[in-house]
Amino acid sequence: MSAEEGTKEKLVQDLMVLLRDAEDLVKSTGENVARKSKEELMVALAKAKATCQRMEERATANARSADRIIRSHPYPSIGLAFGLGIILGVLANRR
């Protein structure tokens, strides 16, 4: 797993924790918040949770797909990574 994948997973996990905390906060507020506003906030939280879950599922599927491709074509993958590294190195040294 690359550092970018780990960062994405950490972001999704942090968002889920934030959403759970926000949901708990909304549930714990009593009559101070109008019922309609509370319901709207709960709907928005549910949508955000669904979006985070879809993002996590898509990221996992993409990672599995990339892993399958790399495992089925290891030498071309290494060559491509090497070539991209050279190109990026040349571009970075030009500046």
Image (cartoon, rainbow, N blue to C red):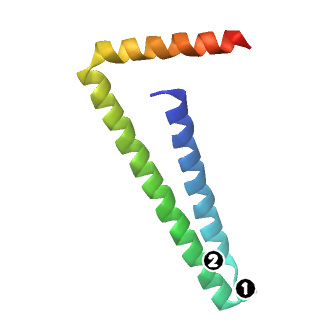
Extreme residue in the left direction: 72
Picture coordinates of residue 83, whole percent (x, y): 46, 12
On the image, numbered disc 2 is attached to which residue? 41
Residue nearest the observer in this picture, 9 or 22: 9
Q: Mark 2 vs mark 1: give the one in front.
A: 2
Residue 33 bears which disc, if any?
A: 1
The amino acid beneath tag 2 is Leu
Picture coordinates of residue 35, whole percent (x, y): 65, 90
Picture coordinates of residue 43, whole percent (x, y): 55, 77
At x 54% / y 48%, what residue is drawn? 13
Picture coordinates of residue 60, whole percent (x, y): 39, 43
Vertical arrangement, residue 71 with respect to residue 63, above or below: above
Vertical arrangement, residue 62 with respect to residue 4, above or below: below
Residue nearest the observer in this picture, 58 or 15: 58
- Say whether residue 74 is left or right of residue 21: left
The amino acid beneath tag 1 is Val
Name the image quarter holding the N terminus. top left
Q: Secondary structure at mark 1?
A: loop
Residue 18 bears which disc, if any?
A: none
The CA distance from mark 2 to mark 1 is: 10 Å
**Residue 21 sits in which quadrant?**
bottom right
At x 70% / y 11%, what residue is drawn? 94
Residue nearest the observer in this picture, 73 or 31: 73
Mark 1 Cα-neighbour bin, 10 Å: few <14, some 14–19, many ≥20: few
At x 67% / y 14%, what residue is drawn? 92
Query: Given contact means CB atoms under 8 Å apart, are the residues at marks 2 and 1 in contact?
Result: yes
Q: Secondary structure at mark 2?
A: helix
Give whichever of discs 2 and 1 has the lower sequence position: 1
Name the image quarter holding the C terminus. top right
At x 49% / y 27%, what residue is drawn? 2
